[in-house]
Amino acid sequence: MSNSGGTMLAAMIYGVRDLRVEEVAKPEVRHGEVLVKVKAATMCGTDLKIFNRGYVEGVIKLPTAFGHEWAGEVAEVGEGVAWPKRGMRVRAGNSAPCLRCRMCQRGNFNLCEDMLWLWGAYAEYIKVPSRMVLVNMQEIPAHVSFEEAAITEPLACVLRGAEKANVKLGDTVAIIGAGPIGLLHLLVARRLGAERVLVVDLVDERLEFAVGLGADEVVNAGREEAVKRVRELTDGYGADVVIEAIGQPSTWEQAFKMARKGGTVLEFGGCPPNTEIRVGTEMLHYGDLTVVGAFHTTPTHFKRALNLIASATIDVKPLITQKMPLEKIKEAFETLTTSKKDIKIAINP
């Protein structure tokens, strides 16, 4: 057991919009565990959901430290840890499947019935449990910044979603939402060989950002009828693949109407709890649509995502639009809630 002791600063969330930076006990590492000094933690849509409306009770219980996209430097290692070494630059997933439950045995590691979740990246240090050290921790190459490495988590989720949607060479892909996740889907679709990528959003600044990242056409759904415009841009057919990256029942329903016959709809954005959607049976049946959901990701996709960032196959640097210290984290959340110009803010504890 470590005898480090001491205190550290951490952002604690107590309820909706109730976020406080407090002095808390610095974690002590035990057998198999690793303590990492957080160098960068990036803010994402899930964090905003937790801040603004709460989250799935089975995943996070309040009050708690939170934040889950992070990278840092190993400060201490517990007994029995042969890897990583102290001083190593690392990142770890926010989840580690058990590998032995029925879901894991079927290869559905994202649906593990005994998933270990890790929150607490908005802090000076984060303790990585032994299972996660073994199953879902990677070393960061020297040329990759901590901020870039932190984006491994959302990119891993997007990679798995694109895999389920079966985005292919020559496809026309329509993406609803030009936030961080929608923009990552844009980057991935481009790398998978999509011939055209259309992006729909309500904010001109984000649509301009999407154009800068390679979107062929953008649609402002506040000024145009989005479904009608997407169909016009696809000669009346609709897109081969439609990706919903917002998480609202209305846009989930809209996604069906943007897809061509025989196309695929990926419902990627997580909606508020206890919400439902209405879908026309004729559209599904006679339109021969494939509809898929995609929740979270797997250790394999985490590793793949970091490799894509390290090789610059996926350039995530433009997504980091601002950096702020831990003490200003509430201000950072307010900024992301009200301003649509920022895509991702990196917190540097």
Image (spheres, rainbow, N blue to C red):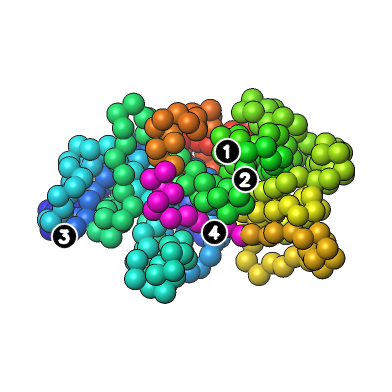
Q: Looking at the rendering, which quadrant does residue 338 occupy?
A: top right
Label 4: which residue? 295
Magenta stretch holds residue 146: no
User: What residue sits right under mark 1 in the picture?
Assistant: 192
> Looking at the image, how many numbered discs can be counted on the residues?
4
Residues at discs 4 and 2 in contact (Cβ within 8 Å): no
Q: Quadrant of the C terminus?
A: top left
Q: Which residue is mark 2?
A: 167
Instruction: Residue type at mark 1: give it.
Output: Leu
Mark 3 or mark 1, whichever is nearer to me:
1
- x and y, in percent, of residue 145 in the image: 37, 30
Residue drawn at x 36%, y 59% as measured from the top left: 96
Residue indicated by mark 3: 31
- Label 2 is placed on what type of residue? Val
The percent position of residue 184, horizontal first and vertical second, equals 57, 39
- Callouts 2 and 3 close, C-beta under 8 Å: no
Q: Does residue 331 show up?
A: no
Q: CA distance from mark 4 to mark 2?
A: 17 Å
* Few, some or many residues within 10 Å of mark 2 (<14, 14–19, 20+): many
For label 4, count other residues whose C-alpha is less than 10 Å away and answer few (under 14), some (14-19) or many (20+).
some
Q: Nearer the viewer, residue 76 or 15?
A: 76
User: Which one is earlier in the sequence, the residue at label 4 or at label 2?
Assistant: 2
Label 4 SS: loop
> Mark 2 falls on what kind of element?
loop
